[in-house]
Amino acid sequence: MSRNFDDFEDIDEIQVSDSKLPEYKVKADTIDLIGFPLLHPKTGKAVFKRVKRFRHNDGERWHKFQAPTETEFLKEVIQEIGEPEERFVTVVIKYETDKQGNLKKPITGEILTILLSPTQMINLKKLSKVKSLSKNDLQVSSTNPDFQSKDFTPTNRAIWDLLKKDGKTPYLTKQDVLSADLEDEEDSDSSSPWTRDEVIEEAWQLADRGMDKIVADRYADRKIREVLGLEDELEHGSVTIDDELDSDLEVEIDDSEENKPY
């Protein structure tokens, strides 16, 4: 008996994508060092995505889902369970440090998503008016890591921004190795230097994977109706909420729900 294997893949040939995004989390009694390489192509400023989400307990478990984009249905959900929460998300480079925030040698880094509350976003806005986030890394600490509270202290340089554009003097490589003192390494035997532009490109690649997913799940309208026990879906208009990326100096924020769980 012959079988059709057109829909099957050999185990050695199967390619699986990991839908879980790498996320930055603060830890107790630790100072981290992060940079903001996700930049607006015209202004050169750090950018953030505003995400509105709902939290609802259906009697069995808590659901966190992003606000629907269809205006009339959004109004229906708000009428049922109240206004959505607001969070902000972007991509950062986190450097490897000791617990006091001192860079380890050799210096290493990784690209991660980061979730920010309205109050944290307000603090970043204030800092960015004094020191640009695109030119200055930040030290990050937390007094309440369970709720992912974040305290920011600006430094005097952005290490990732000091990377060479042409790759001839590689500070950072694909293997995440950075020279400890940021001096020229013309004799480096690294075959694949990680340039400044490549750091920015990798940050955008992570952003394009749907960085807003770390804020809340994306439920289909039918799933939202099921969770909330609403009637069958009705026909509505097509007006949507603007979810464009916001510049670090242009975000308008409501921090009234700051003390809610992370």
Image (cartoon, rainbow, N blue to C red):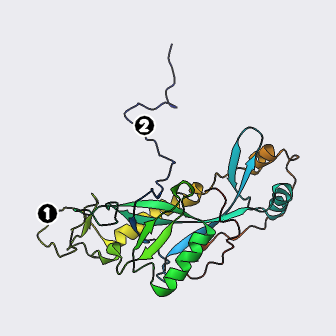
**Residue 191 lies in what quarter of the image?**
bottom left
Image coordinates of residue 194 in percent, x first then y, are 29, 66
Percent across and percent down for residue 262 are: 60, 56
Question: Which mark is drawn over residue 209?
Answer: none
| 4 lies above or below 220 | above
Q: Quadrant of residue 76?
A: bottom right
Q: Residue at x 59, y 60 (%)?
A: 212
Q: Which mark is residue 14?
A: 2
Q: Which residue is mark 1?
A: 189
- The residue type indicated by label 1 comes to Asp
Q: Position of residue 1 (x, y in %)?
A: 51, 12
Residue positioned 46% across, 41% down in the render: 16
Q: Nearer the viewer, mark 2 or mark 1?
A: 1
Label 2 Cα crowd, 10 Å radius (few <14 / some 14-19 / many 20+): few
Asked whether the viewer can see residue 247, the reply is no
Q: Is residue 208 left or right of residue 74?
A: left
In this view, the residue in front, 119 or 171, is 119
The x, y position of residue 2, in whole percent, is: 50, 17
Direction from residue 171 to residue 231 in the image, left or right: right
Amino acid type, residue under disc 2 in the picture: Ile
Instruction: Say whether residue 146 is left or right of residue 97.
Output: right
Q: How many marks?
A: 2
> Horizontal placement of 126 versus 203: left or right?
right
Q: Nearer the viewer, residue 28 or 62?
A: 28
Residue at the bottom extreme? Answer: 130
Front residue of this view, candidates 135 and 62: 62
